[in-house]
Image: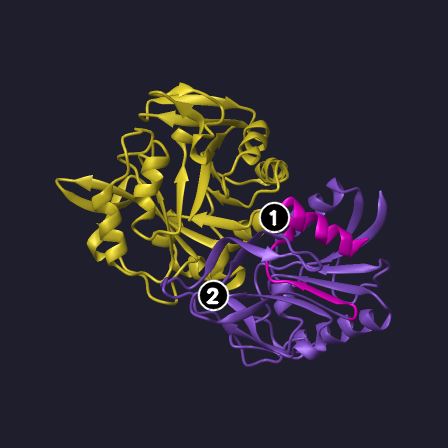
Chain colours: A purple, B yellow
C-alpha cells in the first residue's frame, strides 16, 4: 500500500465506496473524525448529504478544524456535497458553510424537465485535456455563484435552462468534484487518483 | 435516460424471475454484479428479498457494493433512517424505500432530510384491478393511483414505478400506466420497471420523457426466459 488518505464523513456519505476504491488502487485510507490529528497528505470529504442540517456550533468547529489542516499543508478534496460545503453559503440554509472559498450553492433549474434533482451521467471535460468523459451526478443543488479569479482551474457545465454550475475546481490546496469520480468513468477515476498521489 | 439493470438477492444467491413462479438463479451475486458492470448499464439496482437487515446482511451488502464501480441503489427491508445510513455508508449511492413510505412517514422524511432527497428512491408497486390502477404495499391495496401525489416535502429524488403485473413477463411496457404517471407532472425523476423486453421497448418508454428504466428479467435472460447471464443487446 502507498501513501494513506484520510476519509471524513461529515454527515451521511458513501464513505465505504471511497475506502474500497482507494484500496483497489493500492492506496491505504483511514477514517477520521472532527478534531482528529490528520497524518496524511490528503483528506477527502465524502458527500451524499450536506451541512444544511447541522447547527452553527458544529459548522464553526468543523471550519476551525479544516482550516488547521490547510495550515498544515494538507490537501482537501471535497466530493459532491463535500465540495459544496467548502464554499460560503447555500440556499438550503441560512448558516454560513466552511467559507474556504467564496461562492454560493443554489438550487439548480433542470427545466424543461420538472425534476428536483439530476441523477445520472454527464460528459465532463477532463482538465488539461480535450477529452470529455462520463461523470456520475446525483444532486439538486450546485455552485452557480463563484469567482473564477480565485480558482486555479475549473470546469463548468451548462444546463438546458442556460444555468451554469461548477463541476470541478482547484484552488491552492483545495479540490472539488460536484460529481462522484469514484463512480464515474475510468478516465475520471484515474484523474482522481492523480490528484491524490 | 439511464438504463439500469436489476438483480434480486436472497440468502447470498442472486436471481431473476420469469412469470413469477420461475426463479432463474444467476449464482453468486458478486459475480452477477461484476458481469453487469462490464456492459453499458448505468446503475445496478439490488433488491434484497431477505426481509431483515442485520449485521451479517450489512457485511454481505458491503461485499456487493465493492463488486463494481457502477453506482448502486439498494432496496429491501429498509425500515429506519439508521439502516438507510448504514447502507449508504457501506457504499450504496441510493436507498429505495417502499412500504416505509406508507407505514411511517416520519421515518421516511427523516431519511429524506438526513440523506438528502437525491439519495432516496421511492418505489410504488402498481397493479391493475378491474381496469383501475392501484398502489399496493405488503399485499394490500393502499390507494388508487389516481389519488397518489407527492408534495415538495415528501418528494424523493426518484420515483420507481413498478408494474407488478408485468414483472418478469417480458410482454412490453405498460403505455397506459406511463401516461397516467407522466400526467401527474411530479417534480422528480421517474424510473419505470415492468415488461421491458428489448431496446425497442426502452425507446418506447423514453418517448414519455422518463429519466430511467430498470430492467430485471430481460437483463439476464433471452428468448422466453432462457437464461443468459448478461443480455447486452440493450447496448449494441
On the image, numbered disc 2 is attached to which residue?
A: A159
Which one is in front, A118 or A122?
Answer: A122
**Image coords of residue A39 (percent x, y):** 86, 59
**Image coords of residue A96 (percent x, y):** 62, 80
x 49%, y 49%: residue:
B95
Placement of A64 over or under B108, stated as above or below: below
Subunit under mark 2 = A
- View extreme (front): residue: A130
Mark 2: secondary structure:
loop
Between discs 2 and 1, the one toward the N terminus = 2
x 39%, y 30%: residue:
B218
Which one is in front, A20 or A150?
Answer: A150
As drawn, the label of residue A183 is 1
Q: CA distance from mark 2 to mark 1?
A: 21 Å
Q: Over which residues does the magenta segment extend?
A: A172-197
Subunit under mark 1 = A
Name the side, left or right, on which B191 lies relative to B70.
left
Question: Any magenta on residue A185?
Answer: yes
Placement of A6 over or under A143, stated as above or below: above
x 26%, y 48%: residue:
B178
**Image coords of residue A36 (percent x, y):** 80, 63
Mark 1: secondary structure:
helix
Placement of A71 over or under A80, stated as above or below: below
Amino acid at each position: 500500500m502507498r501513501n494513506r488518505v484520510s476519509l471524513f464523513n461529515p454527515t451521511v456519505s458513501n464513505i465505504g465506496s471511497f475506502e474500497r476504491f482507494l484500496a483497489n488502487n493500492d492506496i491505504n485510507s483511514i477514517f477520521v473524525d472532527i478534531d482528529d490529528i490528520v497524518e496524511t497528505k490528503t483528506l477527502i470529504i465524502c458527500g451524499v448529504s450536506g451541512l444544511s442540517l447541522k447547527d452553527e456550533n458544529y459548522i464553526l468547529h468543523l471550519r476551525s478544524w479544516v482550516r488547521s489542516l490547510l495550515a498544515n499543508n494538507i490537501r482537501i478534496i471535497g466530493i459532491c456535497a463535500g465540495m459544496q460545503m467548502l464554499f460560503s453559503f447555500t440556499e438550503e440554509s441560512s448558516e454560513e458553510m466552511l467559507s474556504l472559498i467564496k461562492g454560493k450553492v443554489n438550487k439548480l433549474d433542470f427545466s424543461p424537465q420538472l425534476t428536483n434533482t439530476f441523477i445520472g451521467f454527464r460528459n465532463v471535460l477532463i482538465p488539461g485535456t480535450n477529452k470529455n468523459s462520463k461523470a456520475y451526478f446525483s444532486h439538486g443543488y450546485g455552485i452557480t455563484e463563484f469567482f473564477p479569479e480565485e480558482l486555479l482551474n475549473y470546469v463548468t457545465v451548462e444546463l438546458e435552462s442556460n444555468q451554469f454550475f461548477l463541476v470541478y475546481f482547484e484552488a491552492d490546496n483545495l479540490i472539488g468534484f460536484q460529481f462522484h469520480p469514484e463512480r464515474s468513468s475510468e478516465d475520471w477515476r484515474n484523474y482522481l487518483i492523480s490528484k491524490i498521489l | 435516460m439511464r438504463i439500469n439493470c436489476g438483480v434480486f438477492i436472497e440468502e447470498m444467491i442472486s436471481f431473476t424471475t420469469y412469470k413469477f413462479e420461475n426463479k432463474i438463479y444467476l449464482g453468486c451475486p458478486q459475480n452477477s454484479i461484476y458481469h453487469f458492470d462490464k456492459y453499458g448499464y448505468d446503475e445496478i439496482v439490488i433488491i434484497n428479498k431477505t426481509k431483515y437487515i442485520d449485521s451479517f446482511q450489512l457485511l454481505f451488502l458491503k461485499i456487493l457494493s465493492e463488486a463494481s464501480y457502477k453506482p448502486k441503489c439498494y432496496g429491501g427491508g429498509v425500515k429506519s433512517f439508521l439502516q438507510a445510513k448504514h447502507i449508504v455508508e457501506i457504499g450504496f449511492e441510493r436507498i429505495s424505500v417502499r412500504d416505509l413510505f406508507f407505514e411511517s412517514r416520519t421515518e421516511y422524511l427523516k431519511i429524506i432530510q438526513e440523506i438528502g432527497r437525491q439519495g432516496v428512491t421511492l418505489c410504488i408497486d402498481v397493479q391493475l384491478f378491474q381496469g383501475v390502477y392501484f398502489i399496493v404495499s405488503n399485499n394490500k391495496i393502499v390507494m388508487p393511483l389516481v389519488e397518489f401525489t407527492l408534495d415538495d416535502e415528501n418528494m424523493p429524488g426518484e420515483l420507481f414505478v413498478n408494474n407488478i403485473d408485468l414483472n418478469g413477463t417480458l410482454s412490453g411496457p405498460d403505455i397506459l400506466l406511463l401516461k397516467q404517471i407522466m400526467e401527474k407532472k411530479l417534480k422528480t425523476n421517474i424510473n419505470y420497471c415492468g415488461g421491458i423486453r428489448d431496446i425497442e421497448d426502452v425507446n418506447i418508454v423514453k418517448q414519455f420523457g422518463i429519466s430511467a428504466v430498470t430492467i430485471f428479467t430481460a437483463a439476464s435472460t433471452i428468448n422466453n426466459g432462457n437464461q443468459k447471464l448478461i443480455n447486452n443487446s440493450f447496448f449494441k
